Image: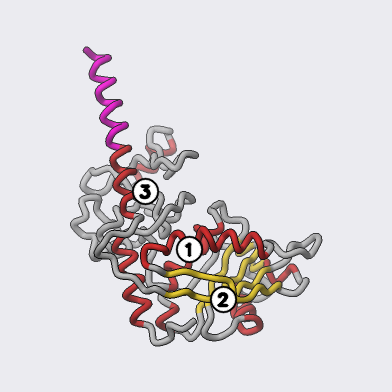
């Protein structure tokens, strides 16, 4: 009897996980009601060189392949990208290493922008290293607030290159991360409009939240799994939300911080379209 119950529980867990991944996969595709833009954006790419042979971190061919993957992510809203210029950042490898000394990181990035960025373009800097960043940086809604967009991508990040760039383009077009450590989004979605990324079709994501003292004690004793995912991109985090519900975030969401990028949700697509159409400088 006990063995039968165990097998039943195992099967229920399997089908529950399968259903969750199926639903998440469906969210990453277009439906008939999804608005679209029908626009191609020109990308001006700036590629740093390595510290030994002074060769570019990425070749034009590698970045062309990246763009093919990138376009698949944005295909549901008919937004595409093409590289209009490939620019190597001279032969000074220090340009691709953004530290906090001898000048601040902010000042170093501003120097790169002032020296190499072009206005009314999406400028993407492919850098070797950025201290303290999570796979690079970009400006939230920069398509609305600035005359150009600048994205900085870090080579040492574990995520795929196309996934990294898509994440930062998401910020450029008005998307937040799926998590917000300063708020606690409930699994039941009851506060989804005021917490997390403020969108209700992205499940609650506990990434970056602090553990309670009791949870910390359990984690230190090996009684609580606090790693977020395993090598197969399965969510294994065990702390629950304040209601005692298990978190089941979409680890494949491009705006998450998990290295498992698959796509955007319907509400994310809609918000990006809204942001793009609201911009007075749409002709990048």
Precedes in sequence: disc 2 or disc 3: 2
Precedes in sequence: disc 1 or disc 2: 1
Residues at marks 2 and 3, CA–CA distance in whole angstroms? 38 Å
Q: Which residue is mark 1?
A: 71
Residue at horizontal 59 percent and vertical 84 percent from the top: 118
Q: Is residue 163 left or right of residue 204?
A: right
Q: Which residue is mark 3?
A: 211
Q: Is residue 243 magenta?
A: no
Name the element at disc 1. helix
Residues at marks 3 and 1, CA–CA distance in whole angstroms? 38 Å
> In the rendered image, is residue 141 in sight?
yes
Name the element at disc 3. loop
Residues at marks 1 and 2, CA–CA distance in whole angstroms? 17 Å
Mark 3 vs mark 1: in front: 1
For residue 141, what is the image quadrant?
A: bottom left
Residue 221 against residue 268 in the figure, above or below: above
Residue at horizontal 42 percent and vertical 64 percent from the top: 74
Q: Residues within 10 Å of mark 3 (few under 14, many from 20)?
A: few
Residue 68 spot, x, y in % from top left: 53, 60
Q: Main secondary structure of the magenta part?
A: helix
Residue at horizontal 41 percent and vertical 60 percent from the top: 255
Q: Residues within 10 Å of mark 2 (few under 14, many from 20)?
A: many
Precedes in sequence: disc 3 or disc 1: 1
Mark 1 vs mark 2: in front: 1
User: What range is drawn magenta here?
Assistant: 1-16
Residue 123 bears which disc, if any? 2
Q: Is residue 3 magenta?
A: yes
For residue 93, what is the image quadrant?
A: bottom right
Mark 2 vs mark 3: in front: 2
| Quadrant of the drawing holding the N terminus | top left
Residue 133 against residue 112 in the figure, above or below: above
Residue 134 spot, x, y in % from top left: 52, 60
């Amino acid at each position: 009897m006990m063995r039968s119950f165990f097998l039943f529980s195992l099967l229920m867990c399997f089908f529950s996980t399968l259903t969750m991944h199926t639903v998440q996969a469906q969210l990453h595709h277009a439906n008939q009601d999804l608005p679209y833009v029908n626009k191609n954006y020109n990308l001006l790419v700036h590629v740093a060189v390595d510290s030994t042979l002074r060769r570019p971190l990425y070749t034009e061919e590698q970045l062309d392949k990246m763009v093919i993957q990138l376009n698949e992510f944005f295909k549901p809203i008919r937004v595409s990208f093409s590289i209009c210029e490939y620019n190597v950042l001279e032969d000074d490898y220090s340009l691709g290493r953004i530290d906090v000394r001898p000048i601040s990181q902010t000042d170093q990035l501003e120097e790169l922008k002032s020296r190499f960025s072009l206005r009314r373009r999406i400028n993407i800097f492919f850098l070797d290293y950025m201290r303290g960043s999570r796979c690079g940086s970009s400006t939230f809604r920069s398509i609305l607030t600035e005359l150009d967009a600048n994205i900085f991508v870090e080579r040492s990040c574990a995520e795929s290159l196309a996934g990294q760039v898509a994440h930062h383009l998401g910020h450029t077009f008005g998307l937040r991360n799926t998590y917000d450590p300063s708020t606690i989004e409930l699994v039941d979605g009851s506060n989804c409009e005021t917490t997390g990324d403020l969108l209700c079709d992205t499940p609650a994501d506990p990434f970056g939240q602090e553990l309670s003292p009791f949870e910390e004690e359990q984690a230190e004793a090996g009684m609580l799994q606090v790693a977020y995912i395993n090598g197969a991109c399965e969510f294994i985090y065990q702390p629950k939300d304040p209601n005692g519900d298990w978190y089941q975030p979409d680890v494949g969401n491009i705006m998450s911080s998990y290295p498992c990028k698959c796509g955007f949700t319907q509400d994310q697509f809609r918000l990006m379209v809204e942001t793009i159409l609201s911009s007075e400088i749409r002709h990048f």
